[in-house]
Amino acid sequence: MSLMLGFTLSKLNLLILVTATFAIVAYFMFGLTDVVISNAAQQTVDTYSEKAANVITSDALCFKTQITVPPHISYFGGIEPAKRFFYLMHISRYPEVHDPQQLTSVIFSISDRKNPDKIRAASRIDINAEVIFYNWEPSEPTIIDESAVAITLDPQSAIMRTDSLIIIKEVLLGETHLHIIACSSAGTCEANLQEVACCKIPNARGGKTSSCLPCPLEPPYPRCNSP
């Protein structure tokens, strides 16, 4: 009887040891995965904030570039297939209202797509410029909102992915303006750019067009009459 009890206890102790070991390893792997995702997100956000910084620090009076972000961030490569992290990229400015007496911060950040409030990484550039966002909503493809204080890119959107930015530096009468236009690489970038050039900028300047971003069409441009 005592032999049977000892055998049972030894098996029970082994089970407890295996369970505890599994729990420790699982906890460690979960924490490691979290760190790896955050590091990959930081590398990604640094890359795109650096591209934006290159636009604003250019010596040119007019400079334009387009940025398209990847559909996901890969991590844990090597022998095993890489895992995928689905994310949102946010671009915001601080302060929200432009003050020519102080620098404007442009903040790039990445959050979990399923939990947008969980910021994984962020990068900031400080610039002496007015930052103007032109936000595009996939559900309202004819409307560009130039009053936005931030833009969110969602490369996994079920409607039409918002995965691109057109960034334009313009120096006008000694003042620098940074135009940031959201769009989709699936086919809206040219249309959004035209609306900003033909409608939004002239409306904001009393009908005057931009020599940096001229309207390529003859007036009237139909989308200028959209809501």
Image (cartoon, rainbow, N blue to C red):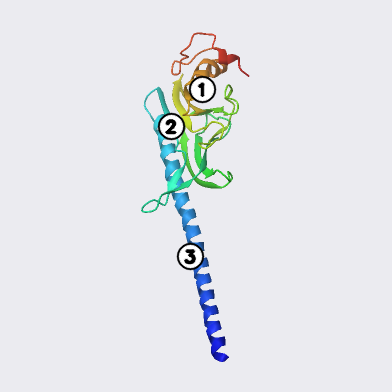
Q: CA distance from mark 3 to mark 1?
A: 50 Å
Q: Is residue 71 above or below residue 99?
A: below
- Does label 2 or label 3 sit earlier along the sequence? 3
Q: What residue is at 53 percent from the left and 44 percent from the top?
A: 111
Foreground pick, 177 / 8? 8
Q: Nearer the viewer, mark 3 or mark 1?
A: 3
| Label 2 secondary element | strand
Type of the residue with mark 3 = Val
Q: What residue is at 50 percent from the left and 58 percent from the top?
A: 30
Q: CA distance from mark 2 to mark 3?
A: 40 Å
Q: What residue is at 40 percent from the left and 24 percent from the top?
A: 63
- Does label 3 or label 1 sit earlier along the sequence? 3
**Residue 19 position within the rendered picture, expressed as x and y whole percent measured from the top left:** 53, 70
Residue matched to label 3: 25
Q: Are marks 2 and 3 in contact (CB under 8 Å)?
A: no
- Does label 1 or label 2 sit earlier along the sequence? 2
Q: Is residue 219 above or below residue 14?
A: above
Task: Answer yes or no: is residue 87 visible.
Answer: yes
Residue matched to label 2: 67
Q: Is residue 18 above or below residue 148?
A: below
Position of the N terminus by quadrant: bottom right
Q: What residue is at 54 percent from the left and 31 percent from the top?
A: 160
